[in-house]
Image: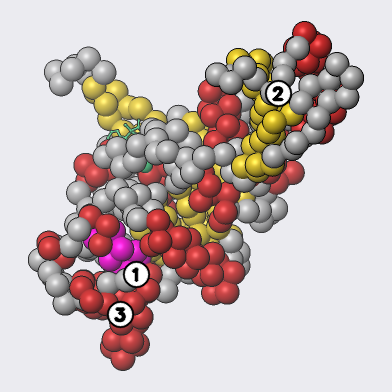
């Protein structure tokens, strides 16, 4: 038996009215033929711009939405036919949605959700305390959630997502609205769960520094379709994402300008009479550029090298829509694909956008409204800046002038 979430040919159609509320309803695919492998013991990323289909995919994996076509298998169990068994193995933390009860205390919420997952009482008592401590809510454990701030509610949502020690954790923008220390703690917990407990994690996030820190493998999707996959480094290399070198020349001359132009760099006058030379290139051009400027008699007042960012790579991919830059064969995390499972149709799948299952289940017991599937849960949040920006000040002085 494969221990992984295997998604094959996944499709989800929603009825939409293009011409106002009285117009005819047509079906639009939010997810359109996705194949994903989410193995245990690793954090896998699912990236794409707003509306790419990330939340829809995660909701199907969490059994909150039925697929219109395709299959989702969790450790070999079908997410539609064996939904109950699948729900015991997974949990979901969504940053943009309220997934806890406001008229209960934090402790009562965890107790309630833990019982839904059949966590034994003694263990649940211990785990509730540990989780409240983990998310920094011990002091507010017995306060009604309606009195929590947004960040506190989000922290409780994280604790709720961990209460059943899921084999697979689905994280949909989990750090949205969290302050920096708690976001950092959550990243640490997630990395630890994957590395030490063997939890399989699927992460969507617009904070790409977070993705680079946690994910060994990333899928990039657009309009519900596969665009590329690979490690963050592979995606950057495949898109030719460029390092940026910024070099300050304190005493620019015709010769240093000619050097900058020969390298294809841009030049910008600085208020103090100097000039800023900026060069974007896939290779590290800091050395050759500095040497050439100094060779042309220039004095280098400062040098900054910004590494290529995953943000650049994702934007390039999403804007160009270039499919298959990194092939699954080159970069698949599990390597294996069950050919017989490709594009299978989920029995009894709804195609009308309804939430799956009418009964209450741990994953949906918080009463997530059906409409929430369409909630624009996230905005294209700020990135944490270029990953690994290096700064160096060089006091090189040119020779002959
Ligand atoms: N219940 C629904 N009814 C109709 N359309 C929907 C519904 N839910 C989602 N959609 C549409 O499906 C597409 C994908 O939405 P989804 O929320 O999965 O995107 P996303 O990648 O999570 O975006 P974001 O980064 O903004 O969170 C969008 O065009 C959205 O409008
Ligand atoms: Mg979303």
Task: Look at the image and tell me whether residue 92 can be seen.
Answer: no
How many residues crowd mark 3 within 10 Å: few (<14), some (14–19), many (20+)?
Answer: many
Q: State the SS at label 2.
A: strand
Q: Residue furthest left?
A: 103
Nearer-N-terminus badge (3/2): 3
Asked whether 157 falls inside the magenta stretch, the response is yes
Total numbered badges shown on the rendered structure: 3
Residue 334 is drawn in which quadrant? bottom right
Nearer-N-terminus badge (3/1): 3
- Which residue was labeled with disc 2? 249
Main secondary-structure element of the magenta-colored stretch = helix
Q: Residue at x 16, y 65 (%)?
A: 145
- Which residue was labeled with disc 1? 135
How many residues crowd mark 2 within 10 Å: few (<14), some (14–19), many (20+)?
Answer: many
- Which residue was labeled with disc 3? 128
Residue 157 is drawn in which quadrant? bottom left
Nearest the eye: 286 or 39: 286
Residue 147: where, in percent of width, then height?
Answer: 12, 63
In-image side of 174 versus 191 (left or right):
left
In-image side of 274 versus 90 (left or right):
right
Q: State the SS at label 3.
A: helix
Nearest the eye: 368 or 110: 110
Nearest the eye: 309 or 397: 397
Q: Residue at x 31, y 63 (%)?
A: 155
* Colour pattern of the rendering: secondary structure
Q: Residue at x 47, y 40 (%)?
A: 383
Picture quadrant of ligand 1:
top left
Nearest the eye: 332 or 253: 253
Compared to 361, does 50 lie above or below?
Answer: above
- The span shown in magenta is 153-161
């Amino acid at each position: 038996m494969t221990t992984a979430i295997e998604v094959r040919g996944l499709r989800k159609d929603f009825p939409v009215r293009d011409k106002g509320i009285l117009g005819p309803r047509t079906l639009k695919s939010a997810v359109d033929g996705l194949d994903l492998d989410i193995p245990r013991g690793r954090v896998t990323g699912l990236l794409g711009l707003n509306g790419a289909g990330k939340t829809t995919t995660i909701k199907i994996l969490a059994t909150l939405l039925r697929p219109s076509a395709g299959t989702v298998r969790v450790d070999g169990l079908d997410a539609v036919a064996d939904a109950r068994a699948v729900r015991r193995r997974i949990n979901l933390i969504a940053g943009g949605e309220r997934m806890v009860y406001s008229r209960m205390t934090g402790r009562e919420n965890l107790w309630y959700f833990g019982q839904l997952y059949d966590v034994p009482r003694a263990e649940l008592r211990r785990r509730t305390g540990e989780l409240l401590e983990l998310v920094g809510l011990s002091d507010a454990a017995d306060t009604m959630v309606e009195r929590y701030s947004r960040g506190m509610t989000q922290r409780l949502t994280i604790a709720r997502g961990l209460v059943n020690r899921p084999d697979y954790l689905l994280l949909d923008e989990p750090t949205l609205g969290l302050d920096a220390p708690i976001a950092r703690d959550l990243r640490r917990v997630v990395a630890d769960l994957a590395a030490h407990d063997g939890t399989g994690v699927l992460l969507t996030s617009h904070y790409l520094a977070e993705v680079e820190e946690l994910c060994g493998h990333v899928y990039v999707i657009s309009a519900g379709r596969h665009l590329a996959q690979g490690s963050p480094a592979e995606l950057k290399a495949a898109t030719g994402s460029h390092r940026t070198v910024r070099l300050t020349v304190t005493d620019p001359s015709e010769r240093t300008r000619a050097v900058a132009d020969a390298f294809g760099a841009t030049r910008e006058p600085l208020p103090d009479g100097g000039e800023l030379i900026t060069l974007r290139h896939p290779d590290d051009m800091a050395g050759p550029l500095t040497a050439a400027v100094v060779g042309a008699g220039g004095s280098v007042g400062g040098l900054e090298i910004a590494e290529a960012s995953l943000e650049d790579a994702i934007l390039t991919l999403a804007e160009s829509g270039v499919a298959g830059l990194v092939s699954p064969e080159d970069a698949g995390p599990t390597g294996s694909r069950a050919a017989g499972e490709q594009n299978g149709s989920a029995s009894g799948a709804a195609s009308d956008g309804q939430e799956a299952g009418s009964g209450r289940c741990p994953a949906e017991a918080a009463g997530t409204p059906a409409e929430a599937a369409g909630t624009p849960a996230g905005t294209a949040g700020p990135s944490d800046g270029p990953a690994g920006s290096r700064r160096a000040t060089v006091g090189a002085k040119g020779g002959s002038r």
